[in-house]
Amino acid sequence: MSLPSDRAAVTIIVPGYDVAAFAQEALESLRTQTRGDWTAILVDDASTDETGRIFADAAAADPRFRVVRHEERRGLAAARNTGLDLVETPLVGFLDADDLFTPTALERLVGILDETGSDFALGAYVRLRPDAAGAYAAGAVQPWVAAATDPERRATTIDRHPEASGNIVAWSKVSRVEFWRRASLRFPVGRLYEDQVVAQRMYAAARAFDVVPDVVAHWRERHDGTSITQGAHAVDVLNEYLDGMSGGIAELDRAGHSAAVRARVNLILAMDLPPLVRIAQRHPDDAYRRAVGAFTRDLWSRGGASAALDEAAHLAAAAQLW
């Protein structure tokens, strides 16, 4: 049901740059929410394709959509911050314009916050993977996602539930705007993997948060390979990736959340490091190998579960990273 935007409970910030192929589907996933008391700020980051027109058409057809345009491209973090500056509702969430919400995403995330009063709520997500023809199909919930969100927990903390630190994406969460202001949260402009540090700051600063096992978002892995997470072969992208992970760990460490630090280190050792080591083994630029080696040594120094450390040592030795 459509409600006037001034009666909305939550604002969804939807940044987009040249995503005309996907934006219509993303906005439709908002229109079809089972909970209708939302408004959306669509931030066109100086797109050169039809993204701006799609956003404008959505706003013309539904008063819950509002469009803001950057005249020069400023990046995903800046687009999200632009939206944050305009939020007038008690709650805020994010949806990248090439991803999708599931129909009950807001019902579950906003609903549990209504009941608990927690600072934010997070849910599970799955990848939308392309096939050979370019069509997309949703995959299964991955083990690390399930570890962060299943079973449902209400008013928990990162010390009681350290595995939540594995959920580092902005679009799997709905938060209280007051919490963002109290914790002085902003996305770091000009950086890739900007979710990593912000997510860990959220966990470190929260008085309490909720988790639900429901899949709330579908995360698109683009068939043309242009998603940021598909660019890890490039040295500059690798450095951003490693900085994001290291920065997130540092946030938890600085706040004294030692169990969450161990959980995050173990997950990175088990999930993120192995593919990077395999790339390093055959990468033509020695800077790639050196960067992965330095990152591995840093993780090793922090300690973790013996199985994860043993596997990391084996991979590092095979790639001559030591």
Image (cartoon, rainbow, N blue to C red):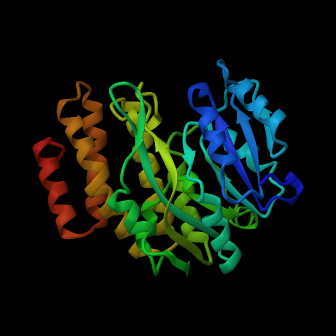
| In this rendering, position of residue 210 left or right of residue 134 | right
Q: Residue at x 60, y 59 (%)?
A: 104
State the residue in front, 15 or 187. 15
Reply above or below: 207 against 254. below
Q: Residue at x 48, y 45 (%)?
A: 219
Of all residues, the one furthest to the front in this rendering is 1
Of all residues, the one furthest to the top in this rendering is 48
Q: Give residue 149's position: percent from left, percent from top.
A: 45, 68
- Residue 23 seen in this snapshot: yes
Q: Give residue 87's position: percent from left, percent from top.
A: 80, 53
Quadrant location, the N terminus: bottom right
Q: Residue at x 47, y 79 (%)?
A: 159
Q: Determine the image quadrant of residue 173.
A: bottom right
Q: Give residue 142's position: percent from left, percent from top.
A: 35, 56
| In this rendering, position of residue 158 left or right of residue 30 | left
Q: Residue at x 87, y 53 (%)?
A: 4
Q: Determine the image quadrant of residue 73.
A: top right
- Residue 75 seen in this snapshot: no
| In this rendering, position of residue 315 left or right of residue 238 | left
Reply above or below: 212 against 197. below
| In this rendering, position of residue 155 left or right of residue 265 | right
Q: Give residue 223's position: percent from left, percent from top.
A: 41, 28
